[in-house]
Image (cartoon, rainbow, N blue to C red):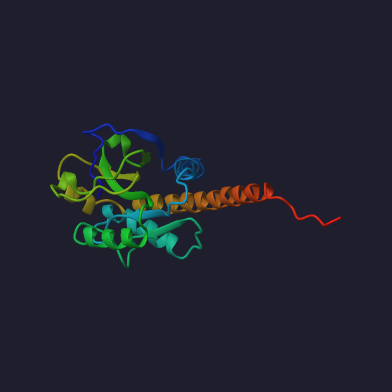
Amino acid sequence: MSTNLWPFKKRPTTFRCHAEEASLTEDLAHALVEFCKHRGNRDLLLICIGTDRSTGDSLGPLVGNLLEGQNLNQFHVHGTLAEPIHAANMEKRLASIYKKHPNAFVVALDACLGKTANVGYITLSAEPLKPGAAMGKNLPEIGDICLTGIVNVGGLMDFYMLQSTRLHVVMSMAQKISKAVAAADQQLTALQTAKTKKAYSFLPTKTEPL
């Protein structure tokens, strides 16, 4: 669980939308594209943090699972229900991922807790994810940007709040985030194709000798 909790710290949020907003998928996809399209030749990773042992903390691996079967061209997705990335294995898994994708542009995804009024909001922030801090865990920061879903109220008895979070809330949020990521992947692929065609258009054409 990401623990940059809303009650305690303001973050440089660049996108914020409630999961029930009709335009969420389109707006989140657009925000992801704006961040990721300037990454150059760096691999694009989506690292989904969390575990299925806690309902509230399962947002990341649920998104990973929903995206696993899709033919994504841009995003390399890590963290699923079968192979989750969590506090116990995080450093080892990240080392393996970064070795395979050195100098990658990383979008880190996790669930978080927040104020009652903010539950249900999805945020995209221009900063790394800081997992485990509110639980007193010293874990490495992850990502160039972070994508979080506020699944329940935080501040007191955080562990209990995660365990008692409704699966429906988390699953609904995961489905919408995964759709946004898939849409962003398609848009980034289209931008890449257009860029390649434009580059080839400047190449000299062969002419027949006189």
Up-down relation of residue 64 to residue 119 (above or below): below
Tell me the quarter of the image containing the C terminus: bottom right
Q: Nearer the viewer, residue 149 or 40?
A: 40
Percent position of residue 77, x then y: 40, 59
**Most distant residue in the left direction:** 136
Judge whether 187 appears above or below 125 on screen.
below
Which residue is rendered at x = 52% and y = 43% of the image? 26
Residue found at the far front of this picture? 210
| Image location of residue 64, percent across then percent down | 38, 59
Q: Is residue 130 above or below residue 86?
A: above
Q: Looking at the picture, does residue 119 appear above or below residue 58?
A: above
Observer-nearest of 30 and 8: 30
Q: Residue at x 43, y 63 (%)?
A: 68
32 sits to left or right of 11: right
* Residue 185 place in picture, x, y as percent: 51, 52
Judge by depth and name the residue closer to the eye, 18 or 47.
47
Hey, which residue is sitting farthest right in the picture?
210
Task: Residue 197: give x, y in percent of width and height.
Answer: 65, 51
Tell how many labels.
0
- Quadrant in the rendering for residue 10: top left
Q: Residue at x 47, y 51 (%)?
A: 41
